Image (cartoon, grey):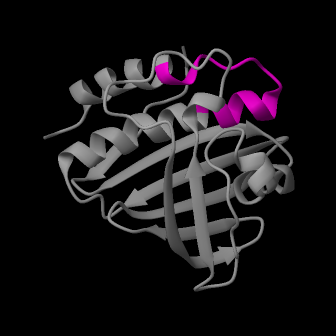
Amino acid sequence: MTDAPYGTQTDPATLTMERLLPGPIERVWTWLTDSDHRRRWLAAGPMDLTPGGTVALTWRNDELTTPPGTRPEGMKPEHSMTGRVIAADPPHHLSYDWPGVGEVTFDLAPAGDRVRLRLTHRRIPDAGTRLGVSAGWHAHLDLLAAGLAGLPPTPHWDNFTRLREIYRARLTP
């Protein structure tokens, strides 16, 4: 279970989440942009950090934790997407489009010996997608925080399922 703050729905199509993570900022940036690090908490794949560059992500959520937890009905063992980098300013800002699901922005700022990460997911197309990305981002950011801190993570799918029910009650329809 996580004690991280929940995401905020700032308008019907935008979700914002923040986390304080172990620094330094360059280390967090590496976990966001390097495929070998990113696959441990989100998805593997190449990322060309130039504007217009390709972002190719492949999720294998069953491989994120041991045990993985119980995969919810309808969720596939693998999912991929290809988008484009909108902007990158290492190690502070990364924004890319996620076709059909919106636009994702990560902003990093030093906060003492920690790093404040603000994730903003814009242009979420509908309530069902908003529910999935809210629980999904929260669960994946929990994995990022655990990985950076060297702590054992909660089984991913069980955490996702629990968070989906919490977000179902928190989000406006």
Residue shown at 85% from the left, 41% from the top: 113
Queried whether the magenta region covers residue 133, the answer comes back as no
- 42 or 18: nearer the viewer: 42
Question: What range is drawn magenta here?
Answer: 142-157
Picture layout, residue 131 above or below residue 79: above
Queried whether the magenta region covers residue 154, the answer comes back as yes
Is 109 placed left or right of 94 in the picture?
Answer: right
Which picture quadrant has residue 125? bottom left
Question: Residue 132, image x and y in percent?
Answer: 34, 40
Q: Quadrant of the N terminus?
A: top right
Question: Residue 54, image x and y in percent?
Answer: 60, 76
Residue shown at 65% from the left, 31% from the top: 64
- 152 or 108: nearer the viewer: 152
Picture layout, residue 91 above or below residue 54: above
Q: Quadrant of the C terminus?
A: top left
Picture layout, residue 170 above or below residue 127: above
Which picture quadrant has residue 91? bottom right
Question: Residue 18, image x and y in percent?
Answer: 54, 43
Which picture quadrant has residue 89? bottom right
Residue shown at 63% from the left, 81% from the top: 53
Q: Residue furthest front?
A: 77
- 72 or 49: nearer the viewer: 72
How many marks are shown on the rendered structure? 0
Residue shown at 29% from the left, 39% from the top: 131
Q: Residue furthest left?
A: 173
Magenta: main secondary structure equals helix
